[in-house]
Image: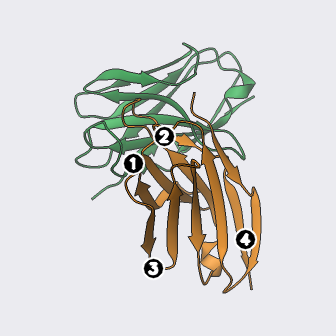
């Protein structure tokens, strides 16, 4: 079945620096790639997503890049702020293979003052 | 507009017991998926309900079953609880069954099996 690897598992940055989280996937038919942010004790919330026909997408300080050939995608957060501290999950979906999201193992991001 | 609501928020059960978790989808959504999130892990897909039928299932045993009602709300039932079933159970809703649009998650039910 589909496998999603996510790195790093923990990431600590200084406020104002950039943070990059990387994911690789195994199912070449995956065509939808969302990123979720989960604060402690709260629900996962979608922060950005990208479809397979797009290589890059940006929303203010957040961007996602997708390399379908290499089967990896990355989340980039610029000008990090303390409120960016949370666990971030990447996920994949194959619209032809059903309706489930396959999640990575998560990255604990800590933004230090 | 209410988002996805789940009940109860926390639950403690004894090994071997049965549990029922409930989910009300976001207004306008007709599809409900259930995920299990163990501590420190990403959510794992259990199954999805659409039009009151289970449409897809992940790698979970038959002890995990569910139901969807005509109002699109859903239940997750787990029989013969094991210690390893302790986790956060998340419900996600979307419209039209197929992903590619945002799946909204509930706050989850924290199940502890002792």
Q: Are marks 2 and 1 in contact (CB under 8 Å)?
A: yes
**Crowding near pointer 2: few (<14 within 10 Å), some, many (20+)?**
many
Residue annotated with mark 3: A60
The quadrant the C terminus of chain B occupies is top right
CA gap, disc 2 and disc 1: 9 Å
Residue A4 horizontal side relative to residue B55, left or right = right
Disc nearer the start of the sequence (2/4): 2
Viewer-closest of A17 and A66: A66
A71 lies above or below A47:
above
Dots 4 and 3 on the same chain: yes
Q: Are the residues at dot 4 and dot 3 in contact (C-beta closer than 8 Å)?
A: no
Q: Secondary structure at mark 1?
A: loop
Residue at screen point 65% across, 58% down? A22
Which residue carries the number 2 mark?
A101
The answer to whether residue B4 of the structure is visible from this angle is yes
Q: Is residue B66 above or below residue A62?
A: above
Q: CA distance from mark 4 to mark 1?
A: 26 Å
Task: Name the residue beneath numbered marker 1.
Answer: B103
Of B100 and B89, the residue lying toward us: B100
From the top left corner, tell me how far across and down residue A45 is, in percent.
Answer: 48, 58
Are the residues under marks 3 and 1 on the same chain? no
Q: Which residue is mark 4?
A: A110
* Chain at tag 2: A
Q: Position of residue A82 (x, y in %)?
A: 65, 79
Q: In the figure, what tint was chain A given?
A: orange
* Image x and y of residue A42, in percent: 56, 57
Q: Position of residue B97 (x, y in %)?
A: 30, 36
For label 3, the SS is loop
Q: Colour of chain B?
A: green
Between disc 3 and disc 2, whose residue precedes?
Answer: 3
């Amino acid at each position: 079945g589909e496998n999603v690897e996510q790195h790093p598992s923990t990431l600590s940055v200084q406020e104002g620096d950039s943070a990059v989280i990387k994911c690789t996937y195994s199912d070449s038919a995956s065509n939808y790639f969302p990123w979720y942010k989960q604060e402690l004790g709260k629900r996962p919330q979608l922060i950005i997503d990208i479809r397979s026909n797009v290589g890059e997408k940006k929303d203010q300080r957040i961007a996602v890049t997708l390399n379908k050939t290499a089967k990896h995608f990355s989340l980039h957060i610029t000008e990090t702020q303390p409120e960016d501290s949370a666990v971030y999950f990447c996920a994949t979906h194959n619209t032809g293979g059903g309706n489930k999201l396959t999640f990575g193992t998560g990255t604990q991001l800590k933004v230090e003052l | 507009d209410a988002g996805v609501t789940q009940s109860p928020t926390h639950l403690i059960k004894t090994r071997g017991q049965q549990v029922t978790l409930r989910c009300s989808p976001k207004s306008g959504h007709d599809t409900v998926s259930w995920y299990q999130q163990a501590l420190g892990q990403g959510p794992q897909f259990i199954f999805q309900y659409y039009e009151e039928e289970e449409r897809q299932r992940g790698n979970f045993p038959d002890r995990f079953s569910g139901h969807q009602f005509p109002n699109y709300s859903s239940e997750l039932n787990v029989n013969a609880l094991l210690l390893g079933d302790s986790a956060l159970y998340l419900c996600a809703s979307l419209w039209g069954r197929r992903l590619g649009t945002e799946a909204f998650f509930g706050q989850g039910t924290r199940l502890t099996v002792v």
